[in-house]
Structures are given as structure tokens and as C-alpha cells.
Image (spheres, rainbow, N blue to C red):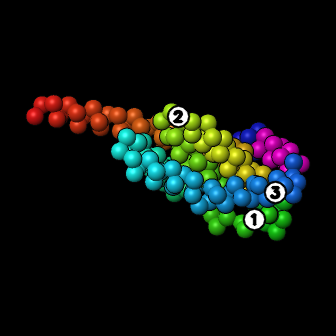
């Protein structure tokens, strides 16, 4: 475990050398965009409103909800990992942060990454021109959390994996449910 912690701080501190006024503003904007989930909620609303994409919209919505429950309610309280700025090894403390410190004390996994990658994966799996931009936005929102020193890199990686797996799992369950309903309807 100490190798992971060492890796996390090495990468986290390396990323801190990238700071500039422009990047600071961009990362703050991205992290707040992820905090409110606005792009993902807009995408879900648009998808749910259209009959041909309604299923995908609900898959994304349920994936985000399950991911948040798993990450924020279960894993954060099982792992109990302090945020980087609260660590004794931190190069930045709470007063050095560019944003208001998160209310949630624990950092593993990143909820921003969970919701962003759950939604972006659902959009990408749908196909079309929005998949790559959605994944890029999810990656940028997730990176902003490390850049702003509120998450470790492994928090973000784990959050991204949870988000992707939730979407794949919920999508698979939706497929099975549709097959079951179709089978039942065919019998009638």
C-alpha cells in the first residue's frame, strides 16, 4: 500500500508543477461543472425526451445513481482515505486550495469521476458524434480534481473504472430485462 501512496504523491506533486492562471481558471470551471453534473444531467434529459434514446438516458441515470451510492456511500466510508490536502505529506494545505474544500472528508473514490465516466460511457456506447467529446470532458473533469489537490490520481482512476463498470452493468441488466419482457410478450 505504501507504494500506491508514494506513486499517488509523486504524480500529484508533479501535476502541481503545471499551474498557470489560465489552467487554474479552466480547472476550477471544470471541477464546478462536474460538481453540479450539469452536462450529464442535460444529456440525460435530452436522451430521455427522445423515444429512440430514452433507454440509454435511463441507463446513464441509473448508472450515475448506482455509482454514487457505491462510491460515496459505501466505498468512501470503508476505505476512509483522507484527501491530499489533509495529509501530513501534503505540499498544499486546505488554505492553499483554489476552491472551497469539499464537504466530504474522504477522497476514495472520486465521485466526480464516477458520475462523469458513467455518463460519458453511456453516451459513447450510444454511438454518434458526442461519444468522444463526452469522454474527453469526463477525463478533464476528473483531471481537475487532481490538479486542484482534492483527489489522488488513484481516486480518479478508481472513480472512472467504477463509472464505466456501472454503465456496462446497468446496460447489460437493461438488455436482459428487455429480452425477458419480449419473451413474456411473445408468449401472450
Quarter holding residue 124: top right
Q: Which residues are magenta?
A: 6-17
- Marks 3 and 1, how far apart at CA: 10 Å
Depth check, front residue: 126 or 147: 126
Q: Which quarter of the figure is the C terminus placed in?
A: top left
Labels 3 and 2: the sequence-earlier one: 3
The 10 Å Cα crowd at callout 2, few under 14, some 14 to 19, many 20 or more, is few
- Marks 3 and 2, how far apart at CA: 32 Å
Write down the residue under mark 1.
99
Write down the residue under mark 3.
24
Give the farthest residue toward the left.
188
172 versus 12 height, above or below: above
Residue at figure coordinates x 64%, y 58% from the top left: 33
Quarter holding residue 136: top right
Write down the residue under mark 2.
128
x and y, in percent, of residue 44 in the image:
47, 51
Magenta region includes residue 14: yes
Secondary element under disc 1, as helix, strand or loop, is loop
Residue at figure coordinates x 46%, y 51% from the top left: 46
Quarter holding residue 154: top right
Q: How many marks?
A: 3
Amino acid at each position: 500500500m505504501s507504494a500506491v501512496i508514494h506513486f499517488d504523491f509523486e504524480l500529484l506533486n508533479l501535476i502541481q508543477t503545471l499551474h498557470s492562471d489560465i489552467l487554474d481558471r479552466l480547472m476550477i470551471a471544470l471541477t464546478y461543472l462536474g460538481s453540479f453534473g450539469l452536462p450529464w444531467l442535460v444529456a440525460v434529459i435530452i436522451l430521455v425526451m427522445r423515444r429512440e434514446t430514452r433507454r440509454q438516458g435511463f441507463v446513464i441515470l441509473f448508472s450515475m445513481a448506482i455509482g454514487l451510492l457505491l462510491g460515496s456511500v459505501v466505498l468512501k466510508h470503508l476505505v476512509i482515505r483522507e484527501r491530499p490536502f489533509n495529509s501530513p505529506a501534503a505540499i498544499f494545505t486546505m488554505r492553499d486550495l483554489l476552491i472551497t474544500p469539499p464537504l466530504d472528508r474522504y477522497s476514495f473514490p472520486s465521485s466526480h469521476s464516477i458520475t462523469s465516466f458513467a455518463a460519458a460511457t453511456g453516451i459513447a456506447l450510444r454511438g454518434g458524434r458526442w461519444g468522444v467529446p463526452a469522454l474527453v470532458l469526463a477525463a478533464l473533469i476528473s483531471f481537475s480534481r487532481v490538479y486542484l489537490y482534492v483527489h489522488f490520481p488513484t481516486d480518479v482512476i478508481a472513480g472512472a473504472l467504477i463509472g464505466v463498470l456501472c454503465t456496462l452493468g446497468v446496460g447489460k441488466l437493461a438488455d436482459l430485462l428487455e429480452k425477458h419482457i419480449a419473451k413474456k410478450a411473445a408468449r401472450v
